[in-house]
Image (spheres, rainbow, N blue to C red):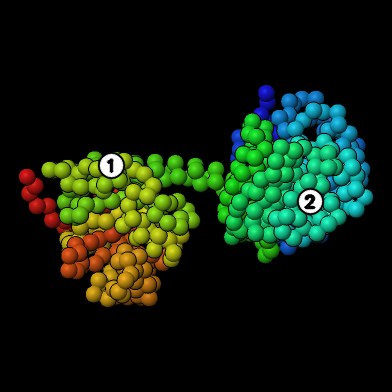
Amino acid sequence: MDRVLLTVGGSDSSGGAGIQADIKTFGALGFHGSSAITAVTAQNTLGVLEVYPMAPEAVRSQLAALAEDFEISAAKTGMLSSREAVQEVAVFFEREEIPLVVDPVVEAEAGGRLIEPEALELLVERLIPLARVVTPNIFEAEAITGFRVADEGSALRAGRAILDLGAEAAIVTGGHLDGDDVLVTGEGDWIIRGERVAGGNHGVGCTYSASLAAFLAGGKDIEEAARLAKAFAAASVKKSIEVGRGASPVNPLGEALERAERYDVLGDVSRGVEALLSEPALVHLIPEVGSNLGMAISGASGPGDVAAVEGRLVRAGKKVKACGSVRFGASRHVARIILSAMSFDPGARAAMNLRFGEDVLEAALALGLSTSHFSREEEPEGRKTMSWGAGDAIRRFRSASNTEDVADPGRISSPVPQVIWDRGGPGKEPMVRLLGRSAGEVADLAVKIARGPSVRREPIN
């Protein structure tokens, strides 16, 4: 069977919802997306300015062309603004045996009505009876059933009313209530629990119904598909893109892109570690507590978003060895440094710690690296040293104009210094930390410092 999905709906010129959101969702879930456009909208994140319905014959021709060539695994409908569009779409799905998700779009998330009253009436009469599942939000459920949906009980009632219209299942999505969805089928009812998710919501309904169609096409039963679609839609909201001045578009590709980025970061750190282990002089820069090299994904929010060496890099005779593999969440120490730096410069995503010494600082300055420091004596009680210390050093660096803390202020292009050092404290080893935009960049700096003529090279047994 071809992994082809079909979306029938409106084009969103802002790219956040409609056909555009559906196609991105299909692709993110491993399907080829095809489309039949029923209307072209002039809209942005602030609202819908104009709607231009496609001629009925144009809708008919698009659907016929797709049916002639593709074996369509599942389909979804979205914006069907005119009665004529609903008529053409209904005739098509009455003829073709394709599992159908009906998303009865009434209004855009950005604002603006997207369906004529007569079109909604025909949708209820002709399309809902063909649906494997109907996915109204509470306002759409009210428009279809004619009664108010204000809580879980009334959402269940609305779902059952939609089943009475002929649908196999109905999911009343709860983004406007408490975040829970109500799934109603002939075999039983389920509450799909969820939470309100912070982020942009332009296109979330389209993304939800498109992902539901994909999961059903992949062989999931309706309950599992509903849960997976809810999680996928929530992730797309979390990864929403801040563009425009209104409702930010969701990002259906966000999770897929993050997975790809995590793979890239693991590779970058691994290559950086290989470069470090192959440099004989690096053994002279390893502190007593060991060293680590880490790198975060973009937009990192916690240690789980930072890849580092499990167990650190340590001295092993005349060499340096890695105690474990590179993985995310392996080091809270280096993660705190990176996360603190990223709060000032999102691009400062990598760091490594080295032993402290005037010889090491001299080598860093000889390379023209910008430096700053913090004092553990000034550390507030109850604060994590690395989070506070890195932040204090960065603030000191930003306010410096021509002090011993900055190697060459004229070359500063980032609000974050390349070197942060401290002289330690009771029970705390003094340390130098390198910061950069990638693990490879930081590893390269460490190798250059290790080769510096000023670096002390004590005999190692």
User: At numbered mark 2, what does the secondary structure look like: helix, strand or loop?
Assistant: helix
For the N terminus, which image quadrant? top right
State how far apart marks 1 and 2 are (Cα).
55 Å
Determine crowd level at label 2: few under 14, some 14-19, many 20+ residues with C-alpha closer than 10 A: many
**Residue beneath disc 1:** 324
**Residue beneath disc 2:** 158
Height in image: 187 above or below 334? above
Tell me which corner region of the image, top left, top right, bottom left or bottom right, holds residue 177: bottom right
Residue 394, given in percent of the width and then of the height, sits at 36, 69
Q: Amino acid at mark 1?
A: Gly
Considering depth in this image, is 208 or 421 the residue closer to the camera?
Answer: 208
Residue 260, given in percent of the width and then of the height, sits at 49, 42
Mark 1 or 2 closer to N-term?
A: 2
Q: Amino acid at mark 2?
A: Ala
**Relative to 194, is 305 on the left or the right?**
left
Question: Residue at left 69%, top 49%?
Answer: 182
Tell me which corner region of the image, top left, top right, bottom left or bottom right, holds residue 211: top right
Height in image: 402 above or below 186? below
